[in-house]
Image (spheres, rainbow, N blue to C red):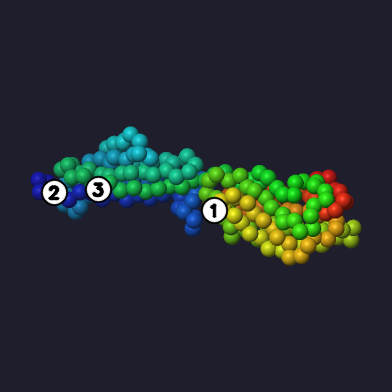
Amino acid sequence: VDDDEVAPTTNATRSVEPNAAGWNNEDVTVTLTATDNEGGSGVKEITYSINGGQPTTVQGSSVQVPVSAEGETTIAFYATDNEGNIEQQRTTTVKIDKTAPAVSSISPINNATGVSPTAKISATFSESGAGIDPATLSTSTFTVVQVRPTGNEPVSGTVSYNESTKTVTFTPDTNLARGRYQVTITTGVEDKADNALANDYTWAFSTVGRPPPRM
């Protein structure tokens, strides 16, 4: 077709769509499919590169690009038809986080004694991927109870999150009474890629002189 002057068009589709936050927690295959204009010379090849790396050219109108690396992967691509018309380069980005968050430090520390009645209770997460989803942090997933012989008594308070330090803090509504306390962060806590904390994380402390039970 000697008068073909229209470049082909390439669409990128994924084997698994991302969640509402734009993340996947599993491997993704991106399929690049090129089509030429009606009556055109037909697609000759697709060229793509990953994160600015060496371009790869594949003959034909379709190619699958597997993505398994955690983090952000940007695929740049364009197609060429048999008449030599080259599509303007386009990109698509895949964000993958397959690692569950974990608690890396706590305050007060486990089995601490003599904790101030005005103390706040906090935990810091190790999470280097999508980041903790603040919507999963609440008094339902971060619970504090006073340990009593007649049964544990919930402590009321508010939960806040500092994204820069990855620290969640429970602030009691009133000063803590003298006694023993148990704190639990549940598997309801997730990162933005929907990876949940692997197990409930529990620790204990006491205010003014009475040791907590060993955990």
Secondary structure type for disc 3: loop
Identity of the residue drawn at 28% across and 41% down = 46
The quadrant where residue 148 appears: bottom right
Between 48 and 71, the one nearer to me in the picture: 71
Residue 4 circle label: 2
Q: Residue at x 29, y 36 (%)?
A: 57
Residue at image point 39% right, 44% down: 74
Where does residue 199 sit, x and y in percent of width and height?
69, 47
Q: Earlier in the sequence, mark 3 or mark 1?
A: 3
- Horizontally, residue 22 falls left or right of residue 143, namely left
- Whichever of labels 3 and 2 marks the residue nearer the N terminus, that label is 2
Q: Can residue 5 be seen from the camera position used here?
A: yes
Q: Residue at x 67, y 50 (%)?
A: 123
Q: Look at mark 1 in the image and give the residue it sits on.
A: 192
Amino acid type of the residue that numbered disc 1 sits on in the rendered structure: Lys
Q: Going by the image, does 210 lie left or right of 11?
A: right
The amino acid beneath tag 2 is: Asp
Badge 2 marks a residue whose secondary structure is loop
Which residue in the protein does label 3 denote? Answer: 88
Select label 1 or label 2 by which is in front. Answer: 1
Please indicate whether residue 87 sits to the left or right of residue 196 in the image. Answer: left
- Whether residues under marks 3 and 2 lie with C-beta atoms below 8 angstroms apart, the answer is no
Q: Secondary structure at mark 1?
A: loop
Residue 197, given in percent of the width and then of the height, sits at 64, 49
Q: Residues within 10 Å of mark 1 (few under 14, many from 20)?
A: many
Q: Which mark is residue 95?
A: none
**Which one is nearer the viewer's eye here, 26 or 132?**
132
